[in-house]
Image: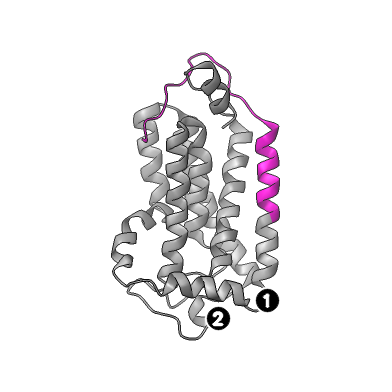
Amino acid sequence: MLHPRPLSAGTAPVRRPADLAAAVVAAGVLVGAGVAAGRNVGDGERRFFELVNRRPAWLEYLLWLPMQLGSLWGPFAVGAVAWWRLRSWRAAVGAVATGVVAWQLAKAVKAVVERGRPLDELDDVVRRIGTPREGLGFVSGHSAVSAALATTMAPYLPRSGRLALVLAAAVVGAARIHVAAHLPLDVVGGAALGVVVGQVWRLAVGVQPVAGAAGEHEEVRGG
């Protein structure tokens, strides 16, 4: 999976205060986005939504497959690949656990904030084949899942792999806006929720260090 590095056998898992700080910051972003989402859609958010939503229709077909990373099947696929390549229960079980928990927590947040889908909040929304017509908007469950997976798997990948996961999560968020499933704040809040879940997992079970050069080893140890 994106060229993971071999784990350091016999090395105790590590936990970093920075992971706790990242979880706290992400929680703050989630709360702030939720408060803003409880108000009317602002001009800036509306303009950004229109910019993405009104891109060519063929993009929906191009984005469909990567968008599945944020579906409920994404964690199981990532977990299977993680076990195949790493033989690490922290990575494999973590991918499944954080992805599923993020999906379920997103439903709970939706029930609290009660923000509608773009079709409920805005006029002149471009509908796509994948545009949902029911349910609530804040937060995006797909964004929560993809961010949780990226956060959980990051310590086991080189810099290029971590960047690829971040970009994949961004694509998932953009795809959800393009198909008019969510407004931008829904995606931001979902990503923040996913980061919180992923960081909590890393703090709870620790991160198994990976082998590599001294400088790289310390970087990956920190996750």
Nearest the viewer among 67 and 158 is 158
Secondary structure found at label 1? loop
Q: In which quarter of the image is the C terminus?
A: top right
Q: What residue type is labelled 2?
A: Glu
- Please rate how many residues cluster around mark 1, counting C-alpha atoms within 10 Å: few if below 14, some from 14 to 19, many from 20: few
Query: What residue is rendered at 58% in x and 72% in y?
Result: 45
Query: What residue is rendered at 33% in x and 72% in y?
Result: 56
Position of residue 188 measured from the top left corner of the image (x, y, whole percent): 57, 60
Q: Which amino acid does label 1 sit on?
A: Arg
Position of residue 138 measured from the top left corner of the image (x, y, whole percent): 57, 67
- Against 145, residue 89 (above or below) is above
Query: What residue is rendered at 60% in x and 73% in y?
Result: 44
Q: In which quarter of the image is the N terminus?
A: top left
Q: Which residue lies furthest to the top in this view?
A: 10
Nearest the viewer among 111 and 21 is 21
Quarter of image, res 121: bottom right
Secondary structure found at label 2? helix
- Against 62, residue 154 (above or below) is above
- What range of the chain is rendered magenta? 1-28
Q: Is residue 14 left or right of residue 65?
A: right
Quarter of image, res 22: top right
Position of residue 204 measured from the top left corner of the image (x, y, whole percent): 63, 34
Quarter of image, res 79: top left
Q: Residue furthest bottom?
A: 123
The residue to which callout 1 is attached is: 39
Query: Which of the marked residues, 2 or 1, is nearer the chain's N terminus?
Result: 1
Q: Is 16 one of the magenta-colored residues?
A: yes
